[in-house]
Protein backbone atom coordinates (compact mmCIF):
# COMPACT_ATOMS: atom_id res chain seq x y z
CA UNK A 1 0.00 0.00 0.00
CA UNK A 2 0.98 3.63 -0.42
CA UNK A 3 0.31 6.02 2.46
CA UNK A 4 -0.32 9.76 2.16
CA UNK A 5 -1.48 12.14 4.89
CA UNK A 6 -2.08 15.85 5.40
CA UNK A 7 -3.74 18.39 7.68
CA UNK A 8 -7.22 19.65 6.92
CA UNK A 9 -8.83 22.79 8.36
CA UNK A 10 -12.53 23.44 7.78
CA UNK A 11 -14.39 26.50 9.17
CA UNK A 12 -17.59 26.36 11.21
CA UNK A 13 -20.50 28.58 10.28
CA UNK A 14 -20.72 29.67 13.92
CA UNK A 15 -18.12 29.44 16.73
CA UNK A 16 -18.76 26.04 18.34
CA UNK A 17 -18.86 26.04 22.14
CA UNK A 18 -19.50 23.22 24.61
CA UNK A 19 -19.41 23.07 28.42
CA UNK A 20 -16.42 24.50 30.32
CA UNK A 21 -16.08 27.27 27.75
CA UNK A 22 -14.35 25.17 25.08
CA UNK A 23 -14.80 27.01 21.77
CA UNK A 24 -13.44 26.49 18.26
CA UNK A 25 -13.98 28.28 14.96
CA UNK A 26 -12.36 25.63 12.72
CA UNK A 27 -12.00 21.87 12.83
CA UNK A 28 -8.45 20.69 12.34
CA UNK A 29 -8.20 17.07 11.21
CA UNK A 30 -5.71 14.50 10.03
CA UNK A 31 -6.61 13.10 6.62
CA UNK A 32 -5.06 9.83 5.44
CA UNK A 33 -5.10 8.12 2.06
CA UNK A 34 -4.23 4.48 1.44
CA UNK A 35 -3.86 3.37 -2.15
CA UNK A 36 -3.21 0.06 -3.86
CA UNK A 37 -3.10 0.17 -7.65
CA UNK A 38 -6.20 2.02 -8.79
CA UNK A 39 -8.00 1.54 -5.46
CA UNK A 40 -8.00 4.38 -2.93
CA UNK A 41 -9.32 4.63 0.64
CA UNK A 42 -9.64 7.70 2.87
CA UNK A 43 -9.80 8.19 6.61
CA UNK A 44 -10.05 11.05 9.08
CA UNK A 45 -9.20 11.86 12.69
CA UNK A 46 -10.20 15.24 14.17
CA UNK A 47 -7.71 16.97 16.45
CA UNK A 48 -9.24 17.54 19.90
CA UNK A 49 -7.44 19.89 22.29
CA UNK A 50 -9.00 18.55 25.50
CA UNK A 51 -7.76 15.05 24.59
CA UNK A 52 -4.30 16.45 23.83
CA UNK A 53 -4.57 15.18 20.25
CA UNK A 54 -2.91 17.30 17.57
CA UNK A 55 -2.57 16.79 13.84
CA UNK A 56 1.15 17.45 14.05
CA UNK A 57 1.59 14.73 16.68
CA UNK A 58 -0.32 12.18 14.61
CA UNK A 59 1.62 13.06 11.47
CA UNK A 60 4.92 12.58 13.28
CA UNK A 61 3.85 9.11 14.42
CA UNK A 62 2.72 8.21 10.91
CA UNK A 63 6.04 9.23 9.41
CA UNK A 64 7.92 7.09 11.93
CA UNK A 65 5.88 4.00 11.04
CA UNK A 66 5.29 4.68 7.34
CA UNK A 67 7.33 1.72 6.09
CA UNK A 68 5.58 -0.81 8.32
CA UNK A 69 2.14 0.45 7.30
CA UNK A 70 2.97 0.39 3.61
CA UNK A 71 4.28 -3.18 3.84
CA UNK A 72 1.05 -4.51 5.38
CA UNK A 73 -0.94 -6.82 3.09
CA UNK A 74 -4.57 -5.71 3.34
CA UNK A 75 -6.52 -8.96 3.07
CA UNK A 76 -8.70 -8.43 6.15
CA UNK A 77 -9.54 -5.00 7.68
CA UNK A 78 -9.89 -6.53 11.16
CA UNK A 79 -6.35 -7.89 10.99
CA UNK A 80 -5.21 -4.44 9.86
CA UNK A 81 -6.87 -2.87 12.92
CA UNK A 82 -5.10 -5.31 15.27
CA UNK A 83 -1.81 -4.47 13.57
CA UNK A 84 -2.48 -0.73 13.99
CA UNK A 85 -3.67 -1.18 17.57
CA UNK A 86 -0.29 -2.68 18.49
CA UNK A 87 1.65 -0.20 16.35
CA UNK A 88 0.00 2.86 17.97
CA UNK A 89 -1.27 1.61 21.37
CA UNK A 90 -1.66 5.12 22.79
CA UNK A 91 -3.15 6.79 19.70
CA UNK A 92 -6.78 5.70 19.13
CA UNK A 93 -7.50 8.77 16.98
CA UNK A 94 -4.67 7.87 14.61
CA UNK A 95 -5.70 4.20 14.56
CA UNK A 96 -9.24 5.30 13.66
CA UNK A 97 -8.11 7.30 10.64
CA UNK A 98 -6.12 4.35 9.29
CA UNK A 99 -8.81 1.79 10.16
CA UNK A 100 -11.38 3.92 8.32
CA UNK A 101 -9.12 4.24 5.27
CA UNK A 102 -8.43 0.50 5.38
CA UNK A 103 -12.13 -0.32 5.31
CA UNK A 104 -12.72 2.18 2.51
CA UNK A 105 -9.90 0.69 0.46
CA UNK A 106 -11.06 -2.88 1.12
CA UNK A 107 -14.60 -1.95 0.11
CA UNK A 108 -13.27 -0.55 -3.16
CA UNK A 109 -11.38 -3.80 -3.77
CA UNK A 110 -14.49 -5.89 -3.07
CA UNK A 111 -16.84 -3.46 -4.87
CA UNK A 112 -19.16 -3.33 -1.85
CA UNK A 113 -20.35 -0.57 0.47
CA UNK A 114 -19.33 -1.16 4.07
CA UNK A 115 -22.86 -1.69 5.38
CA UNK A 116 -23.19 -4.68 3.03
CA UNK A 117 -19.85 -6.03 4.20
CA UNK A 118 -21.21 -5.73 7.74
CA UNK A 119 -24.28 -7.78 6.76
CA UNK A 120 -26.89 -5.04 7.02
CA UNK A 121 -29.45 -3.89 4.49
CA UNK A 122 -29.81 -0.22 3.64
CA UNK A 123 -32.15 0.95 0.93
CA UNK A 124 -34.95 3.49 0.63
CA UNK A 125 -37.27 1.21 2.62
CA UNK A 126 -34.82 0.70 5.52
CA UNK A 127 -35.74 2.55 8.71
CA UNK A 128 -32.67 4.47 9.85
CA UNK A 129 -32.33 7.14 12.56
CA UNK A 130 -32.62 10.82 11.73
CA UNK A 131 -29.52 12.97 12.18
CA UNK A 132 -29.80 15.90 14.56
CA UNK A 133 -28.44 19.44 14.16
CA UNK A 134 -26.28 20.67 17.04
CA UNK A 135 -26.65 24.07 18.67
CA UNK A 136 -23.46 25.04 20.48
CA UNK A 137 -23.63 27.08 23.68
CA UNK A 138 -24.23 30.77 23.10
CA UNK A 139 -26.41 33.61 24.33
CA UNK A 140 -30.01 32.40 24.27
CA UNK A 141 -31.07 34.84 21.57
CA UNK A 142 -28.16 33.72 19.39
CA UNK A 143 -29.14 30.07 19.80
CA UNK A 144 -32.69 30.92 18.75
CA UNK A 145 -31.30 32.72 15.71
CA UNK A 146 -29.20 29.67 14.74
CA UNK A 147 -32.18 27.36 15.13
CA UNK A 148 -34.46 29.59 13.07
CA UNK A 149 -31.78 29.87 10.37
CA UNK A 150 -31.52 26.07 10.16
CA UNK A 151 -34.94 24.38 10.30
CA UNK A 152 -34.35 20.75 11.20
CA UNK A 153 -36.43 17.82 12.50
CA UNK A 154 -34.26 17.19 15.60
CA UNK A 155 -31.92 19.48 17.53
CA UNK A 156 -29.10 18.57 19.86
CA UNK A 157 -28.44 21.33 22.39
CA UNK A 158 -25.13 21.74 24.17
CA UNK A 159 -25.61 22.76 27.81
CA UNK A 160 -23.52 23.33 30.92
CA UNK A 161 -24.38 26.89 31.89
CA UNK A 162 -26.23 28.52 34.77
CA UNK A 163 -29.07 29.29 32.34
CA UNK A 164 -29.65 25.80 30.90
CA UNK A 165 -33.32 25.65 31.91
CA UNK A 166 -34.04 29.12 30.55
CA UNK A 167 -32.24 28.16 27.33
CA UNK A 168 -34.31 25.04 26.67
CA UNK A 169 -37.53 26.76 27.71
CA UNK A 170 -36.94 29.54 25.18
CA UNK A 171 -35.86 27.20 22.39
CA UNK A 172 -39.02 25.16 22.86
CA UNK A 173 -41.07 28.28 22.09
CA UNK A 174 -39.59 28.35 18.60
CA UNK A 175 -39.81 24.71 17.50
CA UNK A 176 -41.93 21.62 17.91
CA UNK A 177 -38.97 19.38 16.96
CA UNK A 178 -37.57 16.87 19.47
CA UNK A 179 -34.70 18.26 21.53
CA UNK A 180 -31.72 16.30 22.81
CA UNK A 181 -29.41 17.63 25.49
CA UNK A 182 -25.65 17.09 25.76
CA UNK A 183 -24.06 18.22 29.02
CA UNK A 184 -20.54 17.00 28.12
CA UNK A 185 -20.01 16.01 31.78
CA UNK A 186 -20.75 19.56 32.84
CA UNK A 187 -23.25 19.04 35.69
CA UNK A 188 -23.11 18.00 39.30
CA UNK A 189 -25.62 15.43 40.55
CA UNK A 190 -27.56 18.17 42.29
CA UNK A 191 -27.82 20.20 39.09
CA UNK A 192 -28.89 17.17 37.08
CA UNK A 193 -31.67 16.31 39.54
CA UNK A 194 -33.09 19.81 39.07
CA UNK A 195 -32.55 20.24 35.34
CA UNK A 196 -33.66 16.87 33.99
CA UNK A 197 -37.28 17.10 35.28
CA UNK A 198 -37.45 20.65 33.92
CA UNK A 199 -36.21 19.45 30.53
CA UNK A 200 -38.74 16.65 30.47
CA UNK A 201 -41.50 19.26 30.74
CA UNK A 202 -40.33 20.99 27.54
CA UNK A 203 -40.07 17.79 25.51
CA UNK A 204 -36.39 16.89 25.75
CA UNK A 205 -35.88 13.38 24.38
CA UNK A 206 -32.66 12.25 26.09
CA UNK A 207 -29.62 13.42 28.05
CA UNK A 208 -26.01 12.77 27.06
CA UNK A 209 -23.27 12.50 29.69
CA UNK A 210 -24.81 14.56 32.50
CA UNK A 211 -22.04 13.99 35.06
CA UNK A 212 -18.26 13.65 35.13
CA UNK A 213 -17.11 10.53 33.31
CA UNK A 214 -15.97 8.76 36.50
CA UNK A 215 -18.79 9.86 38.81
CA UNK A 216 -20.26 6.37 39.06
CA UNK A 217 -21.84 6.91 42.46
CA UNK A 218 -23.65 9.96 41.15
CA UNK A 219 -24.74 8.17 37.97
CA UNK A 220 -26.17 5.27 39.99
CA UNK A 221 -28.37 7.69 41.89
CA UNK A 222 -29.26 9.70 38.80
CA UNK A 223 -30.33 6.63 36.86
CA UNK A 224 -32.70 5.71 39.70
CA UNK A 225 -34.36 9.11 39.59
CA UNK A 226 -34.10 10.28 35.98
CA UNK A 227 -37.33 10.63 34.04
CA UNK A 228 -35.34 10.79 30.77
CA UNK A 229 -32.99 8.26 29.15
CA UNK A 230 -29.32 8.82 29.98
CA UNK A 231 -26.59 8.15 27.41
CA UNK A 232 -22.92 7.66 28.16
CA UNK A 233 -20.41 9.54 26.04
CA UNK A 234 -17.21 10.44 27.87
CA UNK A 235 -17.87 7.47 30.18
CA UNK A 236 -17.94 5.05 27.23
CA UNK A 237 -14.82 5.36 25.13
CA UNK A 238 -13.43 1.87 24.56
CA UNK A 239 -14.87 -1.63 24.30
CA UNK A 240 -14.12 -2.34 27.96
CA UNK A 241 -16.44 0.51 29.00
CA UNK A 242 -19.64 -0.90 27.47
CA UNK A 243 -20.39 -3.47 30.19
CA UNK A 244 -19.68 -0.95 32.96
CA UNK A 245 -21.97 1.66 31.43
CA UNK A 246 -24.85 -0.83 31.24
CA UNK A 247 -25.18 -0.43 35.02
CA UNK A 248 -25.43 3.36 34.97
CA UNK A 249 -26.94 4.45 31.64
CA UNK A 250 -29.79 3.56 29.31
CA UNK A 251 -27.64 3.85 26.21
CA UNK A 252 -24.18 4.65 24.89
CA UNK A 253 -22.81 7.10 22.34
CA UNK A 254 -19.99 5.53 20.34
CA UNK A 255 -17.41 7.85 18.77
CA UNK A 256 -15.35 6.20 16.04
CA UNK A 257 -12.43 8.51 16.71
CA UNK A 258 -12.26 7.79 20.43
CA UNK A 259 -12.84 4.04 20.30
CA UNK A 260 -10.17 3.70 17.56
CA UNK A 261 -12.26 3.08 14.48
CA UNK A 262 -15.05 1.14 12.77
CA UNK A 263 -13.60 -2.25 13.70
CA UNK A 264 -14.04 -1.96 17.49
CA UNK A 265 -17.28 0.02 16.99
CA UNK A 266 -18.85 -3.05 15.36
CA UNK A 267 -18.03 -5.11 18.45
CA UNK A 268 -19.26 -2.37 20.81
CA UNK A 269 -22.65 -2.22 19.06
CA UNK A 270 -23.09 -5.97 19.31
CA UNK A 271 -22.20 -6.01 23.00
CA UNK A 272 -24.37 -3.01 23.83
CA UNK A 273 -27.43 -4.50 22.17
CA UNK A 274 -26.82 -7.76 23.99
CA UNK A 275 -26.89 -5.81 27.26
CA UNK A 276 -30.15 -4.08 26.38
CA UNK A 277 -28.57 -0.67 25.76
CA UNK A 278 -29.72 1.77 23.11
CA UNK A 279 -26.96 2.75 20.68
CA UNK A 280 -26.16 6.19 19.38
CA UNK A 281 -23.19 6.99 17.20
CA UNK A 282 -21.87 10.50 17.54
CA UNK A 283 -19.37 12.72 15.81
CA UNK A 284 -16.47 14.91 16.78
CA UNK A 285 -17.20 17.33 13.95
CA UNK A 286 -15.88 15.02 11.28
CA UNK A 287 -16.07 16.18 7.67
CA UNK A 288 -17.80 14.31 4.84
CA UNK A 289 -15.21 11.50 5.00
CA UNK A 290 -15.58 10.72 8.71
CA UNK A 291 -19.33 11.31 8.59
CA UNK A 292 -19.70 8.80 5.74
CA UNK A 293 -18.05 6.19 7.96
CA UNK A 294 -20.65 6.92 10.65
CA UNK A 295 -23.43 6.73 8.05
CA UNK A 296 -22.44 3.18 7.10
CA UNK A 297 -23.54 2.12 10.60
CA UNK A 298 -27.03 3.66 10.29
CA UNK A 299 -28.94 0.36 9.87
CA UNK A 300 -27.49 -0.75 13.23
CA UNK A 301 -28.20 2.43 15.23
CA UNK A 302 -31.05 3.82 17.33
CA UNK A 303 -29.81 7.44 17.21
CA UNK A 304 -27.18 9.30 15.22
CA UNK A 305 -25.34 12.60 15.54
CA UNK A 306 -23.24 13.09 12.38
CA UNK A 307 -23.84 16.74 11.58
CA UNK A 308 -20.26 17.93 11.07
CA UNK A 309 -20.87 18.71 7.37
CA UNK A 310 -24.02 20.64 8.32
CA UNK A 311 -22.09 22.85 10.75
CA UNK A 312 -19.23 23.72 8.39
CA UNK A 313 -19.11 26.15 5.48
CA UNK A 314 -16.84 23.91 3.39
CA UNK A 315 -17.05 20.25 2.37
CA UNK A 316 -14.35 17.80 1.33
CA UNK A 317 -16.38 15.16 -0.43
CA UNK A 318 -19.49 14.42 -2.47
CA UNK A 319 -22.12 11.74 -2.17
CA UNK A 320 -23.34 12.24 1.40
CA UNK A 321 -26.92 13.49 1.13
CA UNK A 322 -28.69 14.86 4.22
CA UNK A 323 -31.72 15.93 2.20
CA UNK A 324 -33.10 12.50 1.34
CA UNK A 325 -36.40 14.24 1.88
CA UNK A 326 -36.45 18.01 2.22
CA UNK A 327 -35.02 18.86 5.67
CA UNK A 328 -35.85 15.35 6.86
CA UNK A 329 -32.46 14.75 8.50
CA UNK A 330 -32.54 11.27 7.01
CA UNK A 331 -29.40 10.25 5.16
CA UNK A 332 -29.82 8.86 1.65
CA UNK A 333 -28.44 5.31 1.26
CA UNK A 334 -24.74 5.17 0.39
CA UNK A 335 -24.43 2.40 -2.16
CA UNK A 336 -21.04 3.15 -3.69
CA UNK A 337 -18.16 0.88 -2.61
CA UNK A 338 -16.34 1.47 0.66
CA UNK A 339 -17.37 4.64 2.51
CA UNK A 340 -19.74 5.48 -0.34
CA UNK A 341 -18.42 9.01 -0.98
CA UNK A 342 -15.75 10.58 -3.16
CA UNK A 343 -13.05 12.82 -1.72
CA UNK A 344 -12.67 16.36 -3.09
CA UNK A 345 -10.34 19.15 -2.10
CA UNK A 346 -12.32 21.40 0.32
CA UNK A 347 -14.86 23.57 -1.44
CA UNK A 348 -17.53 26.02 -0.28
CA UNK A 349 -21.06 24.66 0.05
Image (cartoon, helix red, strand yellow):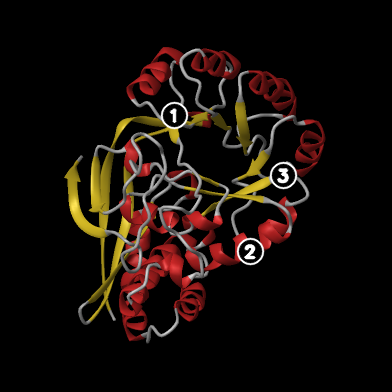
Q: Give coordinates of residue 147: x percent, y percent.
A: 40, 22
Q: Nearer the viewer, residue 162 or 209?
A: 209
Seen in the picture, residue 15 relative to 145 is either above or below; the reply is: below
State the CA–CA distance, disc 1 to disc 2. 31 Å
Q: Nearer the viewer, mark 1 or mark 3?
A: 3
In x, y percent, where is residue 271? 67, 63
> How far apart are the two marked residues, 1 and 3, measured between alpha carbons?
24 Å
Q: Earlier in the sequence, mark 1 or mark 3?
A: 1
Q: Position of residue 85 (x, y in %)?
A: 51, 73
Q: Could you tell me which secondary element the residue under label 2 belongs to?
A: helix
Q: Nearer the viewer, mark 3 or mark 2?
A: 2
Quadrant of the image containing the N terminus? bottom left
Residue at the extreme front: 125
Residue located 43% across and 30% down the image: 17
Label 3 belongs to which residue? 249
Would you say the residues marked 1 and 3 are in contact, meaning their CB atoms lie under 8 Å apart?
no
**The label number, if any, that marks residue 110 in the structure image:** none
Q: Nearer the viewer, residue 187 or 62?
A: 187
Tag 3's secondary structure?
A: loop
Q: How busy is the neighbourhood of tag 3: few (under 14 within 10 Å), some, or many (20 plus)?
A: many
- Mark 1 or 2, which is nearer the eye? 2
Is the residue under label 2 in contact with that under label 3 (CB below 8 Å)?
no
Q: Position of residue 39 (x, y in %)?
A: 25, 76
Left or right of residue 80, residue 266 in this image: right
Residue on which disc 1 sits: 136
Q: Residue at x 42, y 17 (%)?
A: 144
Residue designated by label 2: 270
Q: Residue at x 26, y 47 (%)?
A: 9
Amino acid sequence: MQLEFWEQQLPFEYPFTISNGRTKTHQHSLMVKLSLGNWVGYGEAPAIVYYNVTVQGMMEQLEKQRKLIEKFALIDPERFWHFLHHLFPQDPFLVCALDMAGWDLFGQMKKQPLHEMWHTTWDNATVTPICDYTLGIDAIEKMVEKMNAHPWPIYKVKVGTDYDIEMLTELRKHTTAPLRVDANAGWTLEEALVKIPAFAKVGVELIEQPLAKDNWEGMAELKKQSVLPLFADESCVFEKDVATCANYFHGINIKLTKCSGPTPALRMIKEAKGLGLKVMMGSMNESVIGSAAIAQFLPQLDYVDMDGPLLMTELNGVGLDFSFAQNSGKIAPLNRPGLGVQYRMPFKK
